[in-house]
Amino acid sequence: MRQPVADPDDALVLMAGRGDPRAIRALVAAKLPRLLALARRMLGDSPEAEDVAQETFIKAWRFAPRWRPGAAKFDTWLHRVALNLCYDRLRRRARMSAGPPPDQVDEGPAPDRNLHAVDVGRRVDGALAALPDRQREAIVLCHYQDLGNIEAADLMGVSVEALESLLSRGRRALRTALADMAAGG
């Protein structure tokens, strides 16, 4: 029998389920930055990440009245919803035409500022985006979302050993893809 999960968010979720605007604001303030970071890393697109975060919260508010404390951690549930929405969007992208990508506004710093840091960030983001989906998900959850292996494995629906294997393969692929940077190139 699975032990009930102690969750500091339970009270806020229950209050949000009753329509308490302070609880809703508190949950959004606490959860939005990490959800946006997760979606940006998974999708590589800020506006799309914002849409995913908004959809995630809409689902959370609809589900909040039925929230059962102790069944799961709200944060883990919220991450799973966001990941599912990201995967839905990635699947839609794969079905779309392989035409040239649309022009996008570069929201980064001006070209003459921090060129090296911007280049490094883009290289890392590109290498991360090139990973298979499950490896990227494992890397994002553990290294960018700061989840522990047990929580990330639970969120992904895999064993801790499988998660560690995904992490190992993902890190190895990133090291290979970014080897010239480590060598000073």
Image: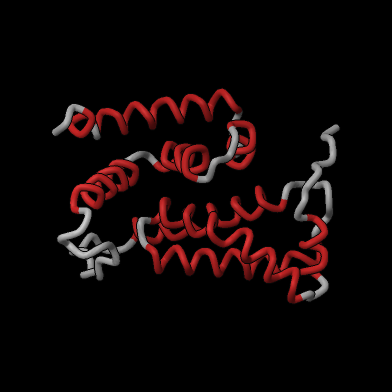
Q: Quadrant of residue 170?
A: top left
**Residue positioned most to the front:** 113
Seen from the viewer's position, the closer of residues 28 and 173 is 28
Residue drawn 24% across the image and 34% down it: 178
Q: Position of 33 compared to 150: left or right?
A: left
Q: Position of 184 compared to 144: left or right?
A: left
Q: Is 112 located above or below residue 173 in the figure?
A: below
Q: How many numbered discs, if any?
A: 0
Q: Position of residue 175 (x, y in %)?
A: 29, 29
Q: Position of residue 69 (x, y in %)?
A: 83, 52
Q: Position of residue 68 (x, y in %)?
A: 83, 55
Residue drawn 41% across the image and 43% down it: 133
Q: How is the image coloured?
A: secondary structure
* Quadrant containing the N terminus in the rendered view: top right
Q: Is 74 located above or below residue 3 in the figure?
A: below
Seen from the viewer's position, the closer of residues 25 and 18 is 25
Q: Is 60 located above or below residue 114 in the figure?
A: below
Residue drawn 82% across the image and 63% down it: 14
